Image (tube, rainbow, N blue to C red):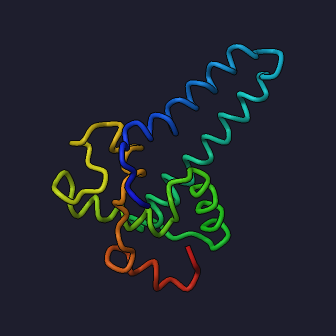
Amino acid sequence: MEAVGNTRAYVLAIVVVPFLGTVSAMGLLWQRAVRLSDLVLLLVMYTVTCFGLTIGFHRMLTHRSFRSHPAMKFLLLVLGSMALVGSPIEWAATHLKHHSQSDREGDPHSPTEGLFHSHIGWLFKDRFADPATYCRHLLEDPRPS
């Protein structure tokens, strides 16, 4: 990703404003255009996307905590990709770089730069790690991730 000039304003405009607008619209349109079934669907999709990110990207790819059947691996990676945080291999490489340089210069999403930066803001900067350096094991996997 390419760094944007005024990153804070960009993240605010792209992430925070739409979120607040959505919550506001849901409140104003309750029982006219937004129903309980919509909120349930939102919660279910959010939950399965988080599972894909935390179980698939984080535990399975990055930390190699477990191996799964190819169909389950595919499902977890698709669900994780729905979070729009980059490709699974790029995400894993960046997270491994984070662990190797935790809270020091070069840490792509250090919490020392603030909670917002460590969770979302880093996505808008050119801080993705090289997969060939940090997760060669994934590049050598015969099943693409």
Which residue ends up furthest to the right in the rendered image? 32
Residue 8: x %, y % from top left: 37, 38
Residue found 32% across the figure and 64% down from its top: 96
Residue 98: x %, y % from top left: 28, 59
Question: In the figure, 113 relative to 69: above or below?
Answer: above
Which residue ends up furthest to the left in the rendered image? 104
Residue 83: x %, y % from top left: 56, 50
Please name whichever residue, 44 or 84, is drawn nearer the observer in this view of the structure: 84
Question: In the figure, 90 relative to 20: above or below?
Answer: below
Please name whichever residue, 86 or 71, is drawn nearer the observer in this view of the structure: 86
Q: How many marks?
A: 0
Residue found 26% across the figure and 48% down from its top: 110
Residue found 26% across the figure and 43% down from its top: 111
Image quadrant in which the N terminus is located? bottom left
75 with respect to 98 (left or right): right
Residue found 48% across the figure and 52% down from its top: 54
Image quadrant in which the C terminus is located? bottom right
Q: Quadrant of residue 71?
A: bottom right
Please name whichever residue, 24 or 58, is drawn nearer the observer in this view of the structure: 24
Residue 78: x %, y % from top left: 63, 61
144 with respect to 54 (left or right): right
Question: In the figure, 142 relative to 62: above or below?
Answer: below
